[in-house]
């Protein structure tokens, strides 16, 4: 059996009985019912994910996948493609945005090359899982073969599973890849039927004029490749990216192991859409961190039924919003575990 199929067989719905028990406790904490808002929702979701009232989420792993995109040659990005490799190195060196924020949150960071258009240095600490150097140009044909799409999912599963086997009990998903907002907009457009113009934004500060070109490139790619919206792997193969597939795979692995996985922004949400398309039960294991300022992000979150709880005007990517959200998830756990209940002080619920 393939690693993908083996993983999919392990995914189960959330533990509804445990969620009800957790909800009853959270409602009985010494506060007006619902007054801690999203923290209460996260505490209940964590119980459903793990089957435990007070799960340990202290060993945090940020998984950052790096890859390049053939569609770059269509002029859809403001930054040169070499930036992907540079940023992957900066993440690994602890000098990027997600690296700094992960350090603050007490999360260990792991970087994996799934398809960068460059060779890794022999002594690089970046994990080499390169499928090939960049996807193909989706405007001229499929971004990858179906076999490569499955391979990208299995890279993510493998990296996440290694982390889980080493005791990590909450995962964040991040990426680096010039042109990956193009692939993300294409994925959401293909799955939802929404026009690319509604989803296409500035990415790394692309001009408004070039955003129009970017949207048309996506329309052309979808028209040419005809991705099947009812087959998420087909969508990934035809208009996706290797790093997006790997993030989706990490989400599948988290669900298979009853481990919460933090979604970052637009690109991570596109990966979540792929993962949920493959198995809808994955949705319950995903915690959506922040409302990215990238144009298509709000619709992408709405499309997968996610409610971001941070709104900070961020659109860096890399996993930066998810890194901040580690703190919020841990706060929800502390709330549930450390607060007294009305019963403790001899009162009824207020």
Image (cartoon, helix red, strand yellow):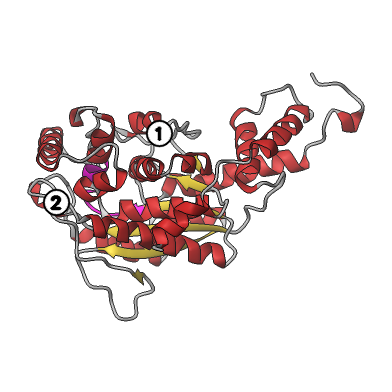
Q: Is residue 182 magenta?
A: yes
State the quadrant of the N terminus: bottom left
Q: Report the span colored magenta.
A: 175-184
Q: Residue 212's image quarter?
A: top left
User: Where 320 sits versus 158, above or below?
Assistant: above
Q: Residue at x 14, y 44 (%)?
A: 76
As drawn, the residue found furthest toward the front would be 1
Image location of residue 282, percent across then percent down: 47, 43
Disc 2 from disc 1: Cα separation: 27 Å
Residue topped by disc 1: 304
Q: Residue at x 49, y 63 (%)?
A: 161
Question: Would you say 50 lies left or right of 218 here?
Answer: right
Q: Secondary structure at mark 1?
A: helix
User: In front here: 220 or 339?
Assistant: 220
As drawn, the residue found furthest toward the right would be 346
User: In front here: 267 or 238?
Assistant: 238
Tell me, yes or no, whether the two marked residues, 2 and 1, touch with CB atoms within 8 Å: no
User: In front here: 341 or 91?
Assistant: 341
Q: Label 1: how many residues lie within 10 Å, few (<14), some (14-19) or many (20+)? A: some
Q: Is residue 55 magenta?
A: no
Residue topped by disc 2: 72
User: Where 272 sits versus 127, above or below?
Assistant: above
Q: Residue at x 28, y 35 (%)?
A: 191
Residue 95 appears in the picture as rendered: no
Q: Nearer the viewer, mark 2 or mark 1?
A: 1
Question: Would you say 53 lies left or right of 191 here?
Answer: right
Image location of residue 304, percent across then percent down: 40, 33
Residue 258 appears in the picture as rendered: yes
Image location of residue 243, percent across then percent down: 31, 55
Mark 2 or mark 1: whose residue is earlier in sequence: 2
């Amino acid at each position: 059996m393939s690693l993908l199929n083996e993983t999919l067989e392990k995914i189960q719905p959330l533990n509804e009985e445990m969620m009800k028990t957790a909800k009853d406790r959270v409602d009985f904490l010494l506060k007006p019912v619902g007054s801690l808002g999203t923290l209460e929702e996260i505490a209940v979701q964590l119980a459903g994910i793990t089957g435990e009232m007070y799960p340990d989420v202290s060993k945090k792993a940020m998984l950052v996948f790096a890859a390049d995109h053939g569609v770059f040659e269509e002029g859809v990005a403001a930054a040169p493609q070499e930036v992907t490799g540079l940023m992957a190195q900066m993440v690994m060196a602890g000098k990027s945005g997600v690296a700094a924020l992960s350090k603050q949150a007490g999360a260990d960071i792991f970087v994996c090359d799934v398809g960068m258009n460059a060779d890794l240095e022999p002594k690089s600490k970046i994990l080499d899982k390169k499928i090939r150097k960049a996807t193909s140009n989706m405007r001229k044909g499929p971004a990858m073969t179906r076999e490569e799409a499955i391979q990208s999912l299995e890279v993510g599963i493998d990296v996440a599973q290694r982390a889980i086997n080493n005791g990590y009990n909450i995962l964040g998903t991040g990426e680096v890849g010039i042109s990956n907002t193009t692939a993300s907009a294409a994925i959401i457009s293909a799955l939802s039927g929404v026009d690319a113009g509604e989803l296409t934004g500035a990415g790394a500060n692309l001009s408004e004029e070039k955003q129009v070109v970017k949207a048309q490139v996506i329309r052309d790619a979808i028209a040419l490749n005809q991705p099947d919206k009812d087959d998420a792997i087909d969508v990934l193969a035809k208009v996706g990216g290797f790093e997006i597939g790997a993030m989706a795979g990490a989400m599948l692995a988290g669900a298979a192991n009853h481990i919460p996985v933090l979604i970052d922004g637009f690109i991570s949400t596109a990966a979540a859409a792929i993962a949920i398309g493959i198995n809808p039960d994955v949705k319950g294991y995903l915690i959506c961190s922040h409302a990215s300022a990238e144009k298509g992000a709000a619709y992408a979150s709405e499309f997968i039924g996610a409610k971001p709880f941070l709104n900070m005007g961020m659109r860096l990517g890399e996993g930066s919003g998810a890194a901040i959200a580690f703190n919020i998830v841990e706060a929800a756990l502390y709330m549930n575990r450390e607060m007294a209940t009305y019963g403790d002080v001899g009162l009824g619920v207020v």
